[in-house]
C-alpha cells in the first residue's frame, strides 16, 4: 500500500465538520477588528515626531519637555509594542476560532470583557471611535461564536 507521507507516532486529529456560516462571519469580523486596531498605532507613529502632543502624566504630574525628550525612545518602543499586541490577538483569535478551538471562543469572550473596560480609559475622539468600533466588532464576533449553529463546531470530536 502506498503512503505519501511518512508515518509518525503522533496521533492525527480527525477532521471535524466544516465551519458553519456564523463562525466564518465571526472570523471575518476578527480580521476587520485587527485592521481597525491598527489605526491608533498608525496615528501614534505619525505623531511620534511631536511627542509633546501626548501630554503624558506620571504619578499625578505632567512630564516636562525635558523628561519627555529623555523618555522618548522608551515611549516609542512601548507604543509600538502595545500597538502590535492588539492586532496580533485579533489575528490569533480569528485563526484559532476558525479551527474550532473551544478555548479560543472562551478567550475571545474574556478579551471582549477587557475591551469593555478599555472603553472608559480613552480620551481622544479617534481613540474613542476606534475603541468603540473594535468593541462593536468584537461583540458581533463573540455573539456569532456562541450561536447554536456554532456550538456544534466547537464540541470535541466524539462528543454528541
Image: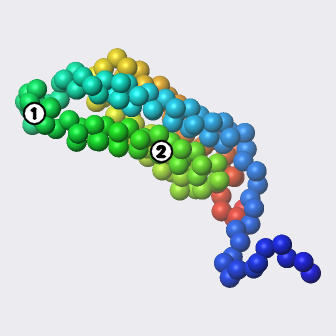
Quadrant position of the C terminus in the picture: bottom right
Earlier along the polypeptide chain: callout 2 or callout 1? Answer: 1
Residue 78: mark in rendering: none
Query: Which callout, 2 or 1, points to the residue nearer the camera?
Result: 1
Residue 67: mark in rendering: 1
Residue 112 picture quarter: top left
**For the point 69% across and 52% down, which residue is it?**
153
Residue 88: mark in rendering: 2
At mark 2, the secondary structure is: helix
Residue 109 in view: no
Query: Residue 24 versus residue 71: which sits nearer the camera?
Result: 71
Residue lying furthest right? 1
Q: Is residue 126 left or right of residue 137?
A: left
Q: Position of residue 150 (x, y in %)?
A: 67, 46
Query: Residue 55 versus residue 114: which sits nearer the camera?
Result: 55
Q: Position of residue 147 (x, y in %)?
A: 64, 41
Residue 77 picture quarter: top left
Amino acid at each position: 500500500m502506498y503512503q505519501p507521507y511518512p508515518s509518525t507516532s503522533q496521533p492525527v486529529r480527525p477532521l471535524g465538520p466544516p465551519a458553519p456560516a456564523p463562525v466564518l462571519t465571526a472570523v471575518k469580523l476578527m480580521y476587520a477588528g485587527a485592521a481597525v486596531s491598527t489605526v491608533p498605532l498608525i496615528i501614534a507613529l505619525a505623531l511620534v515626531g511631536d511627542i509633546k502632543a501626548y501630554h503624558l502624566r506620571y504619578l499625578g504630574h505632567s512630564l516636562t519637555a525635558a523628561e519627555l525628550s529623555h523618555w522618548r525612545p522608551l515611549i516609542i518602543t512601548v507604543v509600538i509594542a502595545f500597538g502590535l499586541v492588539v492586532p496580533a490577538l485579533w489575528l490569533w483569535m480569528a485563526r484559532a476560532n476558525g479551527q474550532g478551538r473551544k478555548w479560543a471562543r472562551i478567550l475571545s469572550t474574556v478579551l471582549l470583557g477587557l475591551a469593555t473596560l478599555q472603553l472608559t480609559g480613552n480620551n481622544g475622539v479617534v481613540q474613542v471611535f476606534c475603541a468603540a468600533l473594535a468593541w462593536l466588532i468584537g461583540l458581533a464576533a463573540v455573539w456569532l461564536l456562541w450561536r447554536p449553529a456554532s456550538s456544534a463546531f466547537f464540541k470535541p470530536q466524539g462528543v454528541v
